[in-house]
Each structure stands twice: as C-alpha cells, then as structure tokens.
Amino acid sequence: MPPTVSDAQFQQPDPNAIGGPWALMITAQGDGFEERAVPLQAVVGTVTVQMIIQSPDGNGFVGFLATSPADGDVLSVGYESLAATSVVFHTGGVA
C-alpha cells in the first residue's frame, strides 16, 4: 500500500539539528509508512526533504528542508515513485 499523508506541519528546526543548518523541519502524519529496502522519498515542490526518519508505528515521518519551498508548493511522497498529497506549503503556516 502506498503511503498517504493526512496532515503535516512545517516548523523552524533546532539550529543545532544534525546535518544542518536547515530552513525548515516537516512533521507529517498519515498511513502506510514502513521500512523498506527503497527509502521513503519526499519533496515539497522542487525542494527535497532530507534526513527522513519514519515513525516506528508507520504513521508518519520527520524530515528537513535545506531551503524554503515556494508558497503553494505541494508535498509529494513515495518509495519508488512520488504521489502528490493534499498538503500545501504556505509561508504563513510555519510555526
């Protein structure tokens, strides 16, 4: 079953987060996130989500973005191919 995202939040990351500095952190909730040989991939518009950590219960993931996406960019996720979700980035929605 392909993963689905029901909600996501964009936040300012800890400035000391490993691998940073990062522009944003994303926390996504949904279903179907499982450990596979092919890792989970995600993009917001053309910005790749990096350092993705899936939740052990398969209900989401956390990741980091090196740059901010454009207002209105859509989150897409998948393992071998990406599928658009209903999550849209809005610059005013960053916590």
Image (cartoon, rainbow, N blue to C red):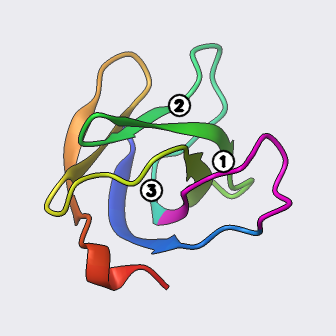
Indicate which disc, 3 or 1, sits on the residue closer to the N terminus. 3
Disc 3 designates what residue?
31
Q: Can you identify the residue that label 1 sits on?
A: 54
| Element class at badge 3 | strand
- Against 74, residue 51 (above or below) is above
When the figure is inspected, residue 73 is found, relative to residue 82, above or below; the finding is: below
Residue 75 sits above or below residue 50 on the image = below
Residue sitting nearer the eye, 56 or 64? 64
- Is residue 1 in sight in this rendering? no
Distance, label 2 to label 1, CA atoms, is 8 Å
Q: Is residue 56 left or right of residue 59?
A: right
Spot occupied by residue 22 in the image (x, y as percentages of width and height): 63, 52
Q: Is residue 32 depicted above or below 13 in this figure?
A: above
Residue of label 2: 40
Identify residue type, mark 2: Leu
Assess disc 1: are there few (<14), some (14-19) or many (≥20) residues with their C-alpha within 10 Å of its C-alpha.
some
Residue type at numbered disc 3: Asp
